[in-house]
Amino acid sequence: MTNEDFYRQLFDKHDKTEAVASNREIAAWALQVIRLLFPEQSKQEFHTIAELKDEFKRLRNELCLVMSATKACENCDSDQLSKSVFEQLPEVYRLLNTDIQEIFEGDPAARTEFEVIRTYPGFFAISFYRLAHVLYQHDVPLLPRILTEYAHSKTGIDIHPAAQIDEYFHIDHGTGIVIGESCVIGKHVKLYQGVTLGALSVSKNMAFTKRHPTVEDYVVIYSGATILGGETSIGHHSTIGGNVWLTKSVEPNSTVYHKPALVVLNKNKD
């Protein structure tokens, strides 16, 4: 194949490919929804609910054009889907307010709830996750992943939209956190930066199985901890120390930590 043939095929492919909304457009829609719920994030003028619904239907339909074989796009009523998604916004708003409360009350550095809403990357990532999770539950293709990956790119916090996260969720600092697809996280859970809730294996045949941990209520996991495996469960009211590596379950009310042997030398004396 000559270079000329190669480029001709590329341009032919572009001509035959349906126009699909960019990730930036999709993220912009999500920001409109989140800022509608929390105007503290921006003082801009917003669309009406009807316009937000219409934009959602447009984005979803464009993605379905290139994914027409998926279950989500077969025999789906766009109007009903949009109605169902927006009917869940009050619950998203309620959940996010519990997250705000948990972050504000759990972080001595937080002076106001406004500060949490406006500046905290953890809340930003949780906001996108909560909205993406609703879309995921409705089998909307691609949009949920695009939204959580947008938040990932902005905050360094990677939450799969399929993860099940209960109310009063607190991410402190957050950079480098990974929460896998089949994670189940209870109420009043606090994660610090660099925590990984991942799978023991990334084999493709484990798709659609429970391969990520369960974290029960009132658990704190400190920075750098790695917890792996679908059968791994962290019991309620437990504390997991920094840099801990866990692949087995922990009983409720446990404290797990390393006991490193540190040697400190004084240059002047030694």
Image (cartoon, helix red, strand yellow):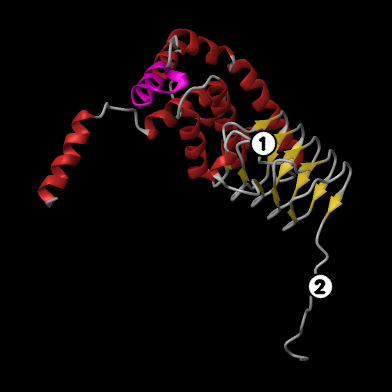
Can see residue 43? no
Neighbourhood count class around disc 1 (C-alpha, 10 Å): few under 14, some 14–19, many 20 upward: some
Q: What element carries label 1?
A: loop
Mark 1–mark 2 distance (CA, rounded to whole Å): 36 Å
Neighbourhood count class around disc 2 (C-alpha, 10 Å): few under 14, some 14–19, many 20 upward: few
Residue in the picture at 32% in, 28% down: 20
Identify the mark at residue 210; answer none if there is no mark.
1
* 99 vs 260: above or below: above
Q: Position of residue 205 (x, y in %)?
A: 56, 40
Residue type, numbered disc 1: Lys
Q: Where is residue 126 in the image (x, y as percent from the top left)?
A: 60, 34
Can see residue 8? yes
Q: Which of marks 1 and 2 is in front?
A: 1
Q: Mark 2 points at which residue?
A: 261
> N-terminal of the two: label 1 or label 2?
1
Q: In front here: 137 or 27? A: 137
Q: In which quarter of the image is residue 125?
A: top right
Is 16 displayed left or right of 73 in the figure? Answer: left
Residues tagged 1 and 2 counted as in contact (Cβ below 8 A): no
Q: Does the magenta stretch include residue 131?
A: no
Q: Position of residue 14 (x, y in %)?
A: 21, 34
Q: In front here: 185 or 39? A: 185
Residue in the picture at 46% in, 26% down: 141
Residues rendered magenta in the picture: 57-73
Residue type, numbered disc 2: Ala
Residue in the picture at 52% in, 36% down: 148
* 160 vs 84: above or below: below
Q: Position of residue 242 (x, y in %)?
A: 74, 56
Q: Quadrant of residue 158?
A: top right
